[in-house]
Amino acid sequence: MKYALVLGGGGVTGIAWETGLLKGLRDAGLEVTRADLVVGTSAGALVGAQVTTGVPLDELYRRQVEPPRRPLERPPDLGKLVDFFAARSNPDGPPAAQTRPTRQMLAWIGAQARAASTKFTERGRLEVIKARLPVHDWPERPLVVTAVDTADGAFVAWRQSSGVPLTLAVASSCAVPWVYPPVTINGRRYMDGGVRSTTNADLAAGKELVLIVAPSSGLRRAMVDGEADELRRSGARVEVVVPDAAAIESIGPNPLDPARRVQAAEAGLAQARAAAEALAAVRAHLSA
């Protein structure tokens, strides 16, 4: 059975929770990273690149729970981004939260991202991504990393065949608008693929089994469910794992808060046992 693993966005805490969850599932006998395709968006792009390039889950988890080497920075303000998604989730308005933003809307956000003043530099962000990726070459295993062109709102799915360095592709997928500067690739500037969708699970179309791991569904849970239903209508078996109540409390209100990293990783690890039980029906296919 052809199987796709979709790793969604979720900031610093999303990386931690996903890492803990994947390790916990592995410890429970479910090595879910052995997929025929890995789709990564934002935090999921980083985790996807790490696991497909062969970085051991134990090492990745250790990084998440080890004490910080220097004082933690204050988390960036997500006000404008939260306001945007909250407006699209207005219960009195159209069901916008169930649909992806139009290309025109993405282009508007892109213009905002290019004009925004942030305390981070593009070069500095690229160095951060490089430090988090021990292997800088694209894996042989199929990996897709998502981003959005800030100029025209075009959705981009970077692959090994795209000819873009892995570190640049992942950095572009993690370029949260209004928080981090867009990433320049071949003269164009790209932002977080999570602006289009927190999971971009539609890229898994054609696979018989799809596991969606979405650390930051929140206001966009309707979109995650909508993408899952879309895949099911095409004939796929789809399983979705989102943070449980304990994990949501551990993650906290700001997914970019580094002070929540350790507890988010531990929450993912703790949730894995129940998640493994919920995935029992497809265990054989996920562990193949």
Image (cartoon, grey):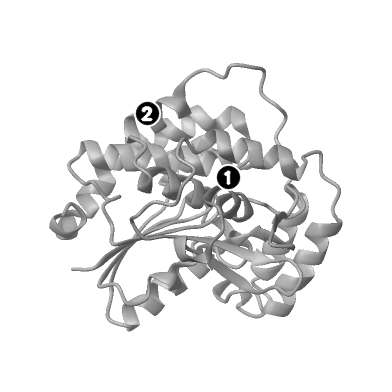
Of badges 1 and 2, nearer the viewer stands 2
Residue 252 at least partly seen: no
Residue occupying the far left of the picture: 284
- Mark 1 and mark 2: span between their CA atoms? 19 Å
Q: Is residue 153 left or right of residue 66?
A: right
Where does the image place residue 196, in percent across and percent down from the top left?
A: 60, 68
Relative placement, left or right, of 213 versus 188 is left
Report whether residue 280 is seen.
Answer: yes
* Element class at badge 1: helix
Q: Is residue 208 left or right of residue 179?
A: left
Q: Amino acid at mark 1?
A: Gly
Q: Earlier in the sequence, mark 1 or mark 2?
A: 1
| Image vertical order of residue 207 relative to residue 73, above or below | below
Residue 149: image quadrant is bottom right
**SS at badge 2:** helix
* x and y, in percent, of residue 62 in the image: 40, 25
Residue where numbered disc 2 is placed: 59
Q: Crowding near pointer 1: few (<14 within 10 Å), some, many (20+)?
A: many
Quarter of the rendering occupied by the C terminus: bottom left
Q: Residue at x 50, y 46 (%)?
A: 46
Mark number, residue 234? none
Q: Is 177 rendered above or below residue 260?
A: below
- Report x, y in % for residue 122: 74, 45
Is 250 or 234 nearer to us in this picture? 234
Q: Residue at x 57, y 55 (%)?
A: 169
Which residue is at a point 60% across and 78% down the rendered structure image? Answer: 95
Screen quadrant of the N terminus = bottom left
Q: Amino acid at mark 2?
A: Glu
Residue, disc 1? 11
Q: Is 127 situated above or below 40?
A: above
